[in-house]
Amino acid sequence: MKTHILKITDPARDAHAVALAGDLIAQGKIVAIPTETVYGLATNALNGEAVGRIFIAKGRPQDNPLIVHITELAELYTLSPEVPESALRLAQAFWPGPLTMVVKKNAAVPYETTAGLETVAVRCPSHPVARAIIKAAGVPVAAPSANLSGKPSTTDVQHVIKDMYGRIDAIVDGGPSSIGLESTVIDLTCTPPRLLRPGGITLEQLTQVLGEVAVDPAVSGEPDLSAPVRSPGMKYRHYAPDAQVLIVRGTREHAADYINHQARTCGKRAAVLCFDEEAALYPDLECVSYGPEKDYGALARNLFSALRRLDSGDIDMIFARCPEGGGLSLAVENRLKKAAGFQTISV
Ligand code: TXA
Ligand code: MG
């Protein structure tokens, strides 16, 4: 398939490209678009056949539902027969932005989009290029992250080209994603509301608006595959480079001793993913640092591109340092744990 590349820096100036991308989406073609979280693979959310092609392009399991993107709160009422009061409060506080809400779906939303569920996940992104394209499409837009299923999400157009070129109709280059991790997902169909995936809107921020928020066990631990899952996406190994990843917890010095020793003796081609302050402790190892230890915004922004960089060489073992704290570090920790298949060691 021929994949068109469209560069959109300023939606007003690049109005022709915006209209073209919108048209393709409305027709049920698949277009990768930039958002503030990660790039998404977009098509008309109300067209079940088109949505089916997204699953094929990504190699995505059929039971993992998609997020539907809108540009105004009012559009939520065209997708759901029952918009709870909590959704209005959250939208007031955090839309447009990196928050996805799960609500009851109506008959307009095909089961292809929700993978057979009676609920639909809806997000209103803030990225000006995403918003202009969705408005131009004139329909709600289904968009999973624009990566091959199981791989780290894409935060830069080069990643999208690597995973998706030749598999979809067009790729919009809108520059790097400013947040770098996928949106927070909260289920509003249960009481109390339940955090299914941590992201750019933190648990603390949600709690401030809603009062009580339950945290799905899959957020911090390995999901129990025998129990019914509330967010099917949480059960798959995810964000995973080809190399094995091991999270190493402990003080800076203990971790460096352990990692340097293991790297010499494990018989694998090893590399380290660490905080900026630690890079000097690994003079003999391939080392990628992804931000200062306490700058969770930088760690979130850089994590996926760091994992992709480490994966582009012939590394087969990555020792990873993981932030611990509140706020956005919960999301970084969640993605890193999933990349590691929950393999963690404390030293
Ligand atoms: O930031 C984002 O959310 C990006 C950008 C493109 O918007 N999209 C994204 O989509 O991350 P995806 O498909 O990679 O992740 C969607 C997540 C999955 O974990 C999926 O299981 C969950 O949302 N999800 C979707 N619909 C759901 C539903 N009805 N109930 C529970 N979880 C749902
Ligand atoms: Mg994804």
Image (cartoon, grey):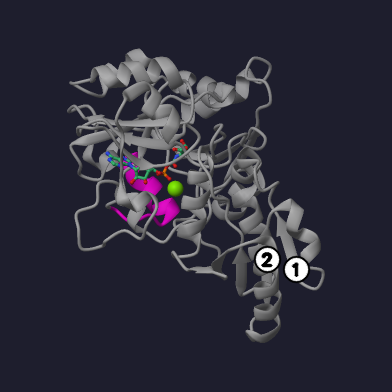
- Left or right placement of residue 119 versus residue 304 in this view: left
Looking at the rendered image, the quarter that the C terminus falls into is: bottom right
Residue on which the image places disc 2: 272
Magenta residues (range)? 49-62
Q: The disc labelled 2 sits on which kind of residue?
A: Val
- Work out whether residue 4 can be spotted: yes
Mostly what secondary structure, the magenta segment? helix
Q: Residue at x 44, y 53 (%)?
A: 58
Residue on which the image places disc 1: 286
Label 2 crowd (10 A; few <14 / some 14-19 / many >=20):
many
Dividing the picture into quadrants, the one containing residue 270 is bottom right
Q: Residue at x 33, y 13 (%)?
A: 74
Q: Which of 30 and 61 is in front in this view?
A: 61
- List x then y, in percent, for residue 145: 47, 44
Numbered disc 1: secondary structure: strand
Please say if the residues under marks 2 and 1 sit with CB atoms less than 8 Å apart: yes
Dividing the picture into quadrants, the one containing residue 298 is top right
The span from disc 2 to disc 1 (Cα, nearest Å) is: 6 Å
User: Does mark 1's beta carbon lie closer than 8 Å to ligand 2?
Assistant: no
The stretch drawn in magenta includes residue 120: no
- Work out whether residue 141 can be spotted: no
